[in-house]
């Protein structure tokens, strides 16, 4: 059975998340339905990462095993036609046949995420559900300085959800940068893998630093506490984007 790698973009607003669930529509379920409509095959696709309800993706990656070979562009276009017919907010950016041992999740070397904050007095119209709206001024340079405490290999118990299923809270953060363009503040994170709610926990904590409520030492103390109660507020899901995966 030929294996295909799918690069997927989606608006996470109407979905319960990436993973197929019984309590509402999922991105995984919508793509699997599109494959069923196209091929008549019931398949289970595997994604490179699970995103929560309301989280978006510009470059989620999944793989699917199909019973027959397809031209790459034909598979992409046909799946997009079925997704559009079902009014899904999902687009297949690329489809390519890969080796049988390729695994969207376990073959990944690095994952890249973006968290967007729009900092202004006026509420969001065009960017509603696309960024975290913060009406108070934020110092992005203070946020960036605090973020560097979190770079490297650490026990991130403070910054993972209580229901996180990872075997270990230890992760290595390769990059955690904060920059600003006008009203937009961007937090960019890179690692081989992340814990559940880790980036949203980072973003909520760094907002405290941007407000001047927390210092670099406060962020370091929260990290070293290894206690979920020491974390700042968890940022809302609409600001988070799964950017891309490196293989």
Image (cartoon, grey):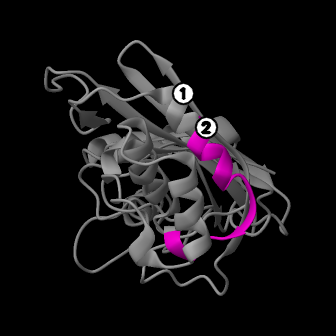
Q: Residues within 10 Å of mark 2 (few under 14, many from 20)?
A: some
Residue 129: image location, x then y, percent: 24, 39
> Picture coordinates of residue 108 (x, y %)?
76, 59
Camera-nearest residue between 100 and 74: 100
Split into 4 quadrants, where in the image is the N terminus? bottom right
Q: Is residue 156 placed above or below 58 in the rendered structure?
A: below
Any part of residue 75 in sight: no
Along the viewing direction, whichever of 214 and 130 lies nearer the viewer: 214
Please, is residue 2 above or below residue 120 in the view?
below
Indicate yes or no whether the magenta region holds residue 169.
Answer: no
Nearer to me, 146 or 113: 146
Q: Say which residue label 1 marks.
A: 141
Q: Residue at x 30, y 52 (%)?
A: 236
Which contiguous range is marked in magenta? 145-158
Q: Residue at x 57, y 69 (%)?
A: 195
Query: What residue is rendered at 32% in x and 27% in y?
Result: 118
| Residue 195 shown left or right of residue 214 in the figure | right
Residue beneath label 2, please?
A: 145
Q: Residues within 10 Å of mark 1 (few under 14, many from 20)?
A: some
The image shows residue 16, relative to residue 181, as above or below, that is below
Which residue is painted at 38% across and 60% down in the image?
A: 232
């Amino acid at each position: 059975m030929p294996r295909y790698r799918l690069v997927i973009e989606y608006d996470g607003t109407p979905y319960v998340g990436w993973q197929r669930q019984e309590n509402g529509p999922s991105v995984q379920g919508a793509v699997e339905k599109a494959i069923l409509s196209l091929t008549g095959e019931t398949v289970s696709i595997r994604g490179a990462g699970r995103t929560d309800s309301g989280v978006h993706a510009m470059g989620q990656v999944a793989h699917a095993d199909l019973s027959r070979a397809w031209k790459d562009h034909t598979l992409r276009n046909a799946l997009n036609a079925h997704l559009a017919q079902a009014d899904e907010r999902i687009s297949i950016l690329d489809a390519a046949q890969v080796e049988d041992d390729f695994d969207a999740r376990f073959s990944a070397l690095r994952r890249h995420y973006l968290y967007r904050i729009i900092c202004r007095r006026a509420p969001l119209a065009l960017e509603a559900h696309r960024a975290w709206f913060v009406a108070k001024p934020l110092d992005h340079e203070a946020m960036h300085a605090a973020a560097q405490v979190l770079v490297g290999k650490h026990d991130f118990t403070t910054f993972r959800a209580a229901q996180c299923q990872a075997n270990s809270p230890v992760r290595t953060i390769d990059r955690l940068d904060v920059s600003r363009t006008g009203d937009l503040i961007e937090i960019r994170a890179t690692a081989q893998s992340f814990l559940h709610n880790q980036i949203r926990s980072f973003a909520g904590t760094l907002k405290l630093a941007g407000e001047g409520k927390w210092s670099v030492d406060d962020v370091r103390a929260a990290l070293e506490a290894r206690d979920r109660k020491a974390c700042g507020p968890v940022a809302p899901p609409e600001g988070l984007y799964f950017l891309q995966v490196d293989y």
